[in-house]
Amino acid sequence: METKPTMLCDIETGMCEIPGAQATTEDTNIAAAQKPIKLLYFTDPICSSCWGIDPQLKKLALEYGPYFEVEYRMGGLLPSWEAYGGRDVNGPASVAQHWEEAGAHYEMPIDGDLWLEDPLPSSYPPSIAFKAAQLQGEEKAGAFLRRIKEMIFLEKKNIARWDNLALAAEQTGLDVAQLKADFEGKAVELFQQDLTLGRQLGVRGFPTIFVTDEKDNRILVYGSRPYAQYEQALLQLHPEAAKQQYDTSYTSLFGKYSTLTTKEFAVLSGMKTTEAEAHLQQLQAQGKIGNYASKNGPLWKSF
């Protein structure tokens, strides 16, 4: 009897694996171009482990931003439920408890009830929407990706639905009509190109980050890893990179990021999570920040 692959992300390895992916690689050039270092980041909007490393990547940007660029690629974690099955996953409901456990492990709010109430049939629609957003600029695309992740992990919104994608686009300053046209046109092929590149590079799951320099030397950081591992990979390829000092005050951090989880604020401010939570609650009580209260933790928002 054939065993179908599972969708559950492994908390120990910090990896969400693609169904049927092979660990073979081809000789593909992915060298950095604009800055000394490039992070070629294979991800998926519904990848809980990818949500789990957002704090580390934000800190890396604040400390080493002048030295690296991030190139986002979509990988296709959930083609359809027909691709999954077997002992661990029998359908969307099987993912709900796993998401709850992943959120607790990463200390990032994740509400698994989405998979009981309004499950996604595939992660391809939001992935294609992101490729469409990239056609309107990387900065807006990054904001769009963040917004749809907030929608799915905290707000239990099915981001395979066009109405939710359109709302996220509107909220992040994208041209919704253009996004729709590209979503149904150019972005489909761009998404397929991402899948092809992932196969060529042997990407088996997410997060997968290839840290590369201008000569195409590369270091693979596979799965959710501590901050030091991302920093070490960057410094190994570019020892000249000097750590930047940055303002850790709430006004500065919320000036850079319109929303932060408690974990993200803790990592960026250098506080313990409990200390950060108390500080954020005090700021909210003083009317200086707001929040969205999800089942498993708030999303703090600048005014």
Image (spheres, grey):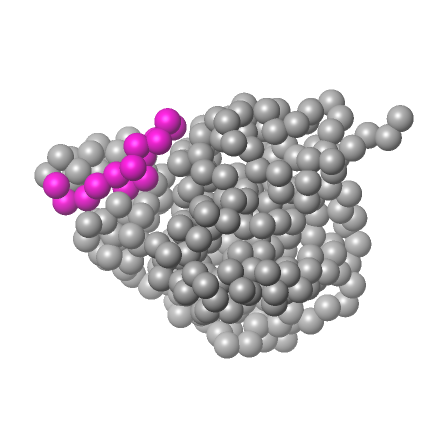
Q: Residue furthest right?
A: 1
Examine the image and state in which quarter residue 121 appears. Answer: top right
Position of residue 25 relative to residue 96, above or below, is below
Examine the image and state in which quarter residue 252 appears. Answer: bottom left
Magenta stretch encompasses residue 240: no
Q: Nearer the viewer, residue 18 or 187?
A: 187
Residue 136 in view in this figure:
yes
Identified at 73% across, 29% down, the residue is 85
Q: Which of 182 and 215 is in front in this view?
A: 182
Position of residue 198 relative to residue 284, above or below, is below
Left or right of 68: which side holds 43? right
Residue 32 position within the rendered picture, expressed as x and y whole percent measured from the top left: 57, 72
Q: Which quadrant does the N terminus fall into?
A: top right
Residue 57 in view in this figure:
no
Residue 55 position within the rendered picture, expressed as x and y whole percent measured from the top left: 41, 47
Residue 126 position within the rendered picture, expressed as x and y whole percent measured from the top left: 54, 50
Left or right of 232: which side holds 64? left
Which residues are drawn in magenta? 287-300
Q: Which residue lies furthest to the left in this view?
A: 286
Residue 102 position within the rendered picture, expressed as x and y whole percent measured from the top left: 51, 31
SS assignment for the magenta stretch, majority = strand
Identified at 66% across, 64% down, the residue is 189
Number of dots carrying numbers: 0
Position of residue 73 relative to residue 278, above or below, is below
